[in-house]
Image (spheres, helix red, strand yellow):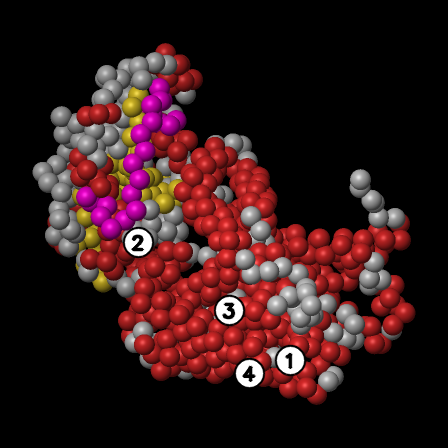
Amino acid sequence: MLIPLDEHHLLVFWVQVASLVLLARLLGWGMRRIGMPGIIGELAAGVVLGPSIFGKVWPEGFEWYLPGEELQSGAILAVGWVGLAFLLVVTGFETDLGLITKLGKSAAYVTSGSLVFPMFGGILLGATIPDSFYDPEQHSRIVFLLFIMLAVSVSSLAVVAKILGDLGLMRRDFGQITVAAGMANDIIGWVMLGIFSGLAASGRFDPLDLLTTVGGLTIFIIFAFTVGQKIIDVWLRGMRRTTNPAKGSLTVLFTTALLFAIATQYIGIEAVLGTFVAGVILNRSRFFDHRALEFIEHITVGFFAPLFFALAGLRVDLSELGDTNTLIWAIVILGVAMGMKFFGTYWGALLADRTNRGALALGAGLNARGALEIVIATVALDLGVFNQTSYTVIVLVPIVTSLFASVALRLIVRGWRGDPGEIERLEREEALSENLLVNTSRILLPSRGGRASIGAAQVMQFAWPLETGATIFTVNQSQGRLLTRFLRGAERGDTRDRRQQPSQDLSEIDITPLQNVLYEREVEHRTVRSPDVADAIISESQLGYGVIGLGVARNEEGVLSISPMAEELLTLSTLPILIVRPPSDRHPAAFSRVLVPVAARSTTRMACEVAFSISSQLGTQVTLAHIVEEKSARETKKRSASEKAPAGFLFPDLRHGGRRRSTASKSATTSHRDVHQGEEILGKTLMLAQEMGAQARSVVHHSINAAEGILEVSETEEADLIILGAQLRRVNNRIFLGHTAEQVLQKSSDTVVVVLTPFDL
């Protein structure tokens, strides 16, 4: 039967929540203002409102505020556990299991040293600490010893990541190892907490119970990372197709976290371990809409996490340290926790061939404790393993160690930028983080195994970082809905015959060459059947991709025209599209010289990103060319653009072949302002090239029109790749890439890439 809170209890409850959250946010903000982790202020808020200060200053008010009634305490503590569940979901999202494997030797040695040495110290503490720190009648010393060992050993990934992030050290070499070791600390800590809490709940050390708990946990984790991962991927994929994918992902997140929490609680392990695993699994799915995570992060950081940490501080009673013997043991516990963690991490880093300064930074960074240690103390207190004295001492550890880690890291890294290789990597990563196009968002490559798509794959392989995954997407079109497609085109004023050739059987498609081109990259091949190829590709593109690569080729007459399907794809896509037209004879093994026409347009930036990324990976020479058109040629081009495009032809100026020639003479005047503007644009673009680690030079070239100039510079510079930026436009209800892009696509004998920005961008 449900027992509701009366009006008085509800009033007290709302006062508790409001005061804890507001003071925690205020003190957390104050700590961040002086460069300290916010968690220190949030814990301090609970100490201020707890028996240590509020209870001493105004005992009557404290009695009203915290009456100690079971129903009243249960209400606020239940909200605190919900806050902890949200915090652990977010922590799971920050846990990258692949990072631990990637860092290999360094992560293994540092993780081992950071855990083994403090665990040894924790065992000594647990064996020698006085009985006043626990109740021997409730639990044996071995159970108490295990919790003490765990509490002084673990680091906090959330606090470590926050400190490194605030100091701008996250992407440093030692920062990555610190995060990897922090992840391992968290994972091992949560597993051990689940085992130890199950042991404490049973009240005795029973090997069979322990085996059952460990076995149940093992089965749960295996299921979560195999069958559970597939179910969640399918579910999130379906949510991506809804009108509000972020809302759908939020539903999946809540449901998964609750189900995993129920599962771990059922097998005798704390529910928060289940929510942590849920966060890890959801983060591994590329179909999760991270706008939902932003919502969870905001509500967690702004409300639930401060409430939980303030509640942890609320249960601290500093008067427990008034006894000299207790104070001495508190100092000893702090010393062992900090000293053994630092010593173990330092020697582990030296064994991993890290520098002395890097080892010191790792020792300081991994000393940061936080959420996990507080959870350990809270669980131990609730199970009766810790009493108020031991709980107070253990909760002090994350406060002191977080202060130590933050101050020590500042001192150690002052004036230290790392070795030249690390500095170069950090500069490239910073440039990559500011990119509009070339980043780690997944690549979508529609292909039926044709030669043109191999060219598109080659360009994207050289330009995009290897950690970016790629999906080769094949659509087998069924023979239907042709009338519907014709009518759809008629509504847009397009009466071209849309009849298709019989579709190629999926069994005949060989994507092995594409997979070979995309080597060392995570590649997925998806095949679907659909009556409308463009609609199928657009539907797939909504599942978390950043760019679409589209290969095109000349037809049998040597004229380049884009198919109705591709035109429809260009019309509907909300993602940037990379059109790649490879040369007719063969694919180059690599690109030695790249030409990028530079103009005062936003599309130029994306084209430069592709070129500079290729250069930084292959050492390719990039030529940045600003084409200055003579005035008379410009007027001719304006008149040409106003002419009606012939029906059914995407490239109206190239229908009869040959380059368009202007009637302007070589003596036509050129604006000095155009030249100056071009030089200014080239200067800024060269700075971008330097930031991205590319080899680039610039030229200013005069020509009768832009396309002619690009082709002339390409021939002079012996370029084997031309990359242009273009904005999609409509001319007489047709997709139009612009005269310059279309002429270069048609006439150049080299590989040509056109970076297209969608209509709505």
Residue bearing mark 4: 335
- The reply to whether dot 4 and dot 3 touch (C-beta < 8 Å) is no
Residue at left 13%, top 26%?
Answer: 557
- Label 4 secondary element: helix
Q: Residues within 10 Å of mark 4 (few under 14, many from 20)?
A: some
Q: Quarter of the image containing the N terminus? A: top right
- Label 3 secondary element: loop
Q: CA separation, marks 2 and 1?
A: 57 Å
Q: Nearer the viewer, mark 4 or mark 3?
A: 4
Q: Quadrant of residue 562?
A: top left
Q: Quarter of the image containing the C terminus? A: top left
x, y percent for residue 281: 46, 47
x, y percent for residue 751: 18, 43
The disc label shown at residue 155, or none = 3
Residue bearing mark 1: 130
* Amino acid of disc 3: Ser
Q: CA separation, marks 1 and 4?
A: 17 Å
**Magenta part of the chain:** 516-536
* Amino acid of disc 1: Pro
N-terminal label among 4 and 3: 3
